[in-house]
Amino acid sequence: MTPRTSWAAAALWLAVGVTPAQATDWTACEHEPSVTERFLPVELINGLPLPEQRVLQLAPVDRSYPFTGVYPSGEPAMQGQTTLKGPVEFRTGDGRTVQAYERAVPQAKEVIAITFPDEAMGRVYDSRAGLMHEAKFPIGLWKQGETRHHTATYFAAGRTGQARTSITIEKLQCRYDGVDGAVAFRWKVDDGRRGDYGYVFAPGRGLVRVIVYRRAG
């Protein structure tokens, strides 16, 4: 790395709150390997306090919070803000009405819901692609290192398309920025050509980090 590149990278790290030391661990989340099985509630995604019981519910939420995006090298990829509101009723591409959250990220407006009961939440709408049904965020009972595959369905221009996706638990429980009980996982489209991302969600904060392996599109 040239001196000019080093200075530029350092400036970017500081701009998004990532230090070179943190960049050596792309999740900046200290793994707790003793936890090998865990119930992941919706509250990890919406940033509300974790429930005492094993329940999957869309509790009322209206909040915004920042996140940092990095490449696997640790260099910054994006900096953004997420807003989450709901629940609201939403009519899906297959005609069902579900409880959902309205979610806004810098690149798009989304609607997310429980799409695979006891397994995952995902988008049922994205302003870039329209109506869809996918699995993106793990919920329910998962094991350390587990990978699950799902079929995502996309409803566009009266035609239905599908793609296989996967969720892999990288760190079932880890400590992020002093907060215990975070989870780090990887989501990707299995064709190897489209989206491939890592995510870290922390209790009381929701989404805190995105790792960009391959951008969607």
Image (cartoon, rainbow, N blue to C red):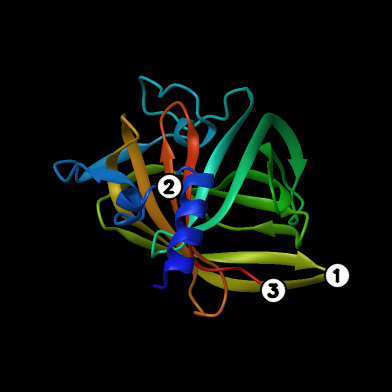
Q: Quadrant of the N terminus?
A: bottom left
Answer whether labels 2 and 3 touch (C-beta < 8 Å).
no
Residue occupying image coordinates x 40% and y 59%:
74
Q: Nearer the viewer, residue 198 or 66?
A: 66
Answer whether labels 3 and 1 touch (C-beta < 8 Å).
no
Under circle 3, the secondary element is strand
Please say if 70 is above or below 114: below
Q: Which mark is residue 157?
A: 1
Reading the image, the residue beneath label 3 is 161
Reading the image, the residue beneath label 2 is 18
Q: Which circle, 2 or 3, is nearer the viewer?
A: 2
Three-letter code, disc 1: Ala
Residue occupying image coordinates x 40% and y 22%:
51
Answer with the quarter of the image where residue 107 lies.
bottom right
Name the spot of residue 141 as percent of width and height, x first: 33, 43
**Disc on the earlier residue, 2 or 3:** 2
Three-letter code, disc 3: Gly
For label 3, the crowd category at 10 Å Cα-Cα, with few meaning under 14, some 14 to 19 and many 20 or more, is few
Residue occupying image coordinates x 57% and y 37%:
66
Q: State the residue lying farthest toward the right.
A: 157
For label 1, the crowd category at 10 Å Cα-Cα, with few meaning under 14, some 14 to 19 and many 20 or more, is few
Compared across the picture, whether 48 is left or right of 104 comes to left
**Residue 202 visible:** yes
Name the spot of residue 179 as percent of width and height, x first: 33, 29
